[in-house]
Amino acid sequence: MIRTENLSKIYQTDEVETTALNEVNIEIKQGEFVSVMGPSGCGKSTLLNVLGMIDGPSSGSYFFNDEEIGHLPERKRSNIRKYNLGFVFQSFNLIDELSVYENVELPMLYTKVPSAERKKRVEELLEGMNIMHRRNHFPQQLSGGQQQRVAVARAIVNNPKLILADEPTGNLDSSNGDDVMKILAELNASGTTILMVTHSQYCAEFGNRIIRMLDGQVVTENVVKQYL
Amino acid sequence: MLQNFFKIAWRNLWKNRFFTFLNLFGLSLGIAVSLALILYVGRERSFDKYHQHASDIYRVGVNAEFDATQQKWASVPNIAGPTFKDKLSEVAEQVRFLRHNFGSTAFVRVNDQNYAEKDLYWVDSTLFDVFDVPLLQGNPKTALNQPNKIILCKSVSEKLFGKEDPMGKTIKVDNNLELEITGIFEDFPSNSTLDASMIGSFYSMRWATENLSWSNCSFETYLLMHTGVTQEALEQKVNQVLDEAVKKEDQWFSFWTQPLLDVHLYSARIANGGYSSRLGDITQINTLSLLALAVLLLACFNYINLTTARSQQRFREVGINKTLGASTGQMAGRFLVETGILVALAFLIGIMLVKLSSPYFESLTGQALPLFETWSFGQMGMLLGLWALITLGAGLYPALLLSTFTPKQLLQPSNTGIAGPRFFRQALVVLQFVVCIALISGAIVLNRQLKFISQKKLGFTPEQVVAITTEAAEDNSQVEALMNAYRNMPAVSSLCLAQGYPGLSVSGYSMTKPGNEEVAIGVNSNHASPGITEVLGLKLLAGQTLPEKSKEDTTVQVIINEKGVEFLGWTPEEAIGKTPPNLYQGNTTIVGVVENFHFESLHNPIGVYVFNNGNDLERSSYMLVKLSSGALQNTLQQLEETFNKYLPKSAFEFTFLDAHTRRLYQNEQQLSKLVWLFTLLTIIISCLGLFGLAAFTAERRTKEIGIRKVLGASSGSLVTLLATEFLKPVLIAVVLASPIAFFGMKHWLQNYAYRIEMSTSYLIIAGALGILIAFLTVSFQSLRAARANPIDSLRNE
C-alpha cells in the first residue's frame, strides 16, 4: 500500500539546514498496523506528515497504491487524502465550534455523502464508541478519552484505507489510552491499515511491526506479531 | 455545506464576542454614515428626473462680458425664448420664468389679511407643456393664458383660504395687482428645482410681455427640444439666432445651455445661478462621497486588521478542515460567510443608526433622509449590492489569507502559525491615522477660520439693526409716516431708508479713472437716506453723511468707501466735492468718504461701494432701524404694531442684520459640523481597531510579559513596551498626514479673501492629539496585561 524510496525531507531556514528525513525506505502492506518509535526530533512526525500527504518530500519517491504521489500538487493530494486517509492526533484536534455529531459528520461534507447516509453513519459510529449520549455536546464539555473517541470516529467515518495516528494516547490516562488502543486494534482487525507514531512501548506493541527511527533514518524494524 | 458554514461562522462570532463587538461597532458606524450619504447623494441626483420630458429640457443662459471679465448667468432676455421657438425647428416649446421683483417677497392681501410669500413667479402658459405640473383644480390650457391670472400650490391655498374653494377668487399682490385664482397645483416635490408656491401668468407683467428686447437678462428660460437634439447643436443654433438678431459689435453676451438634469447640482458656482433656492453643489456632493468612502474604508481596514491579527488562532481550525479534505476555496467561502453575517448584522444596526440620527442629519442638510419611506426594489438592490461590496472588501483578503494555511502547521505543535502579514496590518493602521490626523488638522483650521470670521471687524455694526421691508407701501407718505412714528419710539436710536444692506446684493454700476476712460471698475450702488452712516456705524474719514434733499432735486450726492477713492487716486479729503467719472451719468458729487467695510462675505475682497441719494435712481425697499434697548422681543412687537398701523395693507417682514451676516457663512458652518462629525467617526473607528489590536497583542505576548515580570520588569516599563509597538505607526501617520493637511488646508483657505495664516502649530496640535488618543487607546489594554499576575499568564501559556 505504501512504499518509499530514498524519501528525504530537509527544512531550510535562513542559515540552518535540518534534515528531518534522510533517505527513508519503508513499505507498509494493506492491513498492517505499524508503530513508529524514536526519540523526540528523530523525524517520526515528519514521516507521518509526508505519508499523510500533508507535506511533500524534498527528494525521493512516495508510492501510494503503486502510484507516485510525493510530488503531486496540494489540490490532488487533498483529494486522495479525503477519500483514503483518516487522522488521529495527540491533541485530538476537534473543532471547538462544532458539536460531537457535527465534528464526526464533517469529513463526509467534503466527500459529498448524502445527508441521510451521513446521519446513519455518524449515529452508528457514536453508538459503537459509546458516546451517542454526548452527541450534542461540544468538545470542551468532554473528557480527554471521550474527545479522542470522537476523533477516532471522525477519522474512520469515511471508511479510509489508512489511518495515521500521531501519539493518539499521548494526552490520555492509561485507562482511556487503553480504550483508544483497543479501538484501533479492532479497526485493524477489520482490515484498516494503521500507521501510528508513539513514545510508548506498550502502545507500540498493539501493532504488527515497530519501526524505530533516529536522526531521520530508520534504524531497526521489529516484527511484533506475524501479519496474517 | 452552506448550513455548516453558517453554523461555524455564527458560533465563532459568538465565541469571540469581544472582537465581534469591535468589528460590528466599527462596521455599523461605517455603514450608517455611507448609507446616510448614499441616500442624501441619491436624492440630490434625483432632482427633476420626475418630469416626463426631463432629458429633453434645457435651460439657456448668457455669458456676459463686463469690464473684460466674464460672468455666467442662468437667465436671458425676454425675447430669447419666443425667438428660439419661432426660428428653430428643433425647439418644441419654450417657457420663461420671472421671479417676482427679481427675488423680493410678494405681499399678498386676501380678505383683509396680509401675507408675505417668497416664492411667486411669473410664468408663460406653456409651463404645462414643458414641465409636469399637475393641476388639482383648473384647466392647464386656460389657467395662465391671460393677464391677471394666478395658480397657487395646495399648501399656500390652504394657508390663504383654509377649507374654502379658492377658484375664481381674487388676491392682491403688493397692493397693486389684482389676480384671479385659476388653478391649484400640487406642491412641488422636495426633489424639484422649481420652487414656486404661486405662479402668476407672464402676461400680468405687462412691461415684460410687451417690451421684448435683447438687453434685460432677467428671464430664466427653458426650452423643450425634440428628442435627439444634442446640447452642442442646440448651443450653436441659439448663438446663430443671436448673430442674426444682434450685430456682432453690439453683442455683450453669448448663449450657453444647460440640461435640466444638471441645473440642481451644477449651478451653485454660476454667478447668477437662477431664481431657485433649491440649488445643490456637486463639489459638496463629491466631498461628502469621498468622506463617506473614507469612513467605510477605515471600518473595512479594522475588520481586515483584527481578523488577520487573530489568524494565528484560526490556523488550527483551517488545518483540521484541510486535513479532512476541505479545499482552499471551501475555506475561503467559509470565512466570507462569516464576514457576510457580520456585515448583515452591521447593516441592521447601521439602518437603525440612520433612522435614529435622521433628525440630526435633517438639521445639517435641511432634508429628511428618504430611508424606507417606501420599499422599493431599487433600494433593496442598493442595500444588497452594498452588502456584497463591503463583505468582499472587508472579507476577501482575510479569507484568502486564512484559507491558505496548510494542514502541516496543524501537525507541528511547536509552530504557532504564521505571524500574519504584520507589515500589511501596520500599513493599514498608518493609513487610518493619516486620515484621522488630516481630518483633525482640517477641523482645527476650519474652526480657527470660522472664529476669525466671527471676530473679524466688519467695518460696520450689524448688531441690533433690523431691516424691515417696505416694498408693499401704497405710497411714500405711508413710509414717511412710519419713519416718524419709529423715530419717536424710545427703543429706536436711529433709522434710515435703503435699497439694500451689507450682505445683500445691490445695483451694479461702473466708473472710470479720472483722465482715463479706458480703465473702469465695478461699483456697488445702494440708494439710501441720510441716517445710513449712523445706523450702520460706518466711520466717516472725510466729509459728511448724505444730505436731505427735495423731490425736485436732480443732483446726486454720494458717500464712497476708501477703496473707491483709492481707485480714483484721491485722498479722502481731496475726494470731497469731486465727481467720480461716468458714475450715474454726471451730476454726481462725493460728500463723504467712509472706511472700508465688508459688504460681502469674507470670501471676497472689498470692492467699491457707494451710497447715493439720487431721486431718479433705485427705490429704497428697506427701512433699517437701529435699536438701543436689549428687550428685543418687546421692541419687535412695538415695531410690528406700529407698522401695521401705518402700512395696514402690508405684511411685517424683518431681518436682523447680524443674523443675515452669519447666514453668509452657513455653508462653512454646515461644513464645519460635518467635518467634526467625520473626524469623530474616524477617530472612533481607528481607535476601535487599535484597541482590538492592542488587546490581541497583549494576549499574544502574555507569556513574554509573564517572564519579563518574573525577571523584575515593572508595570510601567511593560506598558511602555507594549504601547510603543502601536505608537510607531501613529508617528509615521503624523509624518505622512502633516504635509497633506498643510497643503490641503492652505488650498481651502484660498477660498477666503480674508483668512488666517496656515501654521504648522495646527499640525503639531493635531499630531499630538492623534498620538495622545492612540496612546490612551492602547495603554488600557497594555496596563491590564502588565498588571496581571505573572504566574497566571505563565500557567495559561
Image (cartoon, coloured by chain):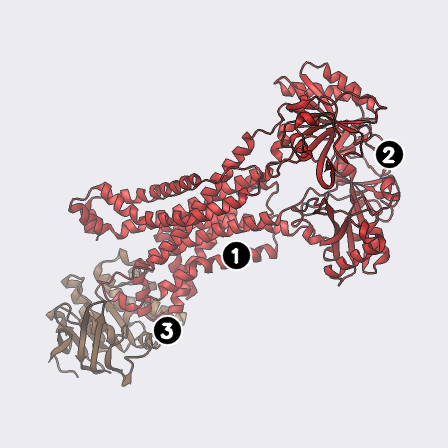
Mark linked to residue B145:
none
> Residue B1 location, x and y as percent?
41, 66
Viewer-nearest residue: B147 or A62: B147
Q: Which residue is mark 2?
A: B178
Q: Are marks 2 and 1 in contact (CB under 8 Å)?
A: no
Which tag is nearer the camera, tag 1 or tag 3?
Answer: 1
Circle 1: residue type? Leu
Residue B681 placed where, x, y %? 46, 44
Q: Nearer the viewer, mark 2 or mark 1?
A: 2
User: What's the mark number on residue B386?
Assistant: 1
Q: Between A19 and B771, which is closer to the camera in this rendering?
A: B771
Q: Nearer the viewer, residue B65 or B506?
A: B65
Looking at the rendered structure, the kind of residue marked 2 is Glu
Query: Chain A, which colour?
Result: brown
Mark 1 crowdedness (10 Å alpha carbons): few <14, some 14-19, many ≥20: some
Residue under label 3: A111
Residue type indicated by callout 3 = Thr
SS under mark 3:
loop
N-terminal label among 2 and 1: 2
Label 2 marks which chain's residue? B
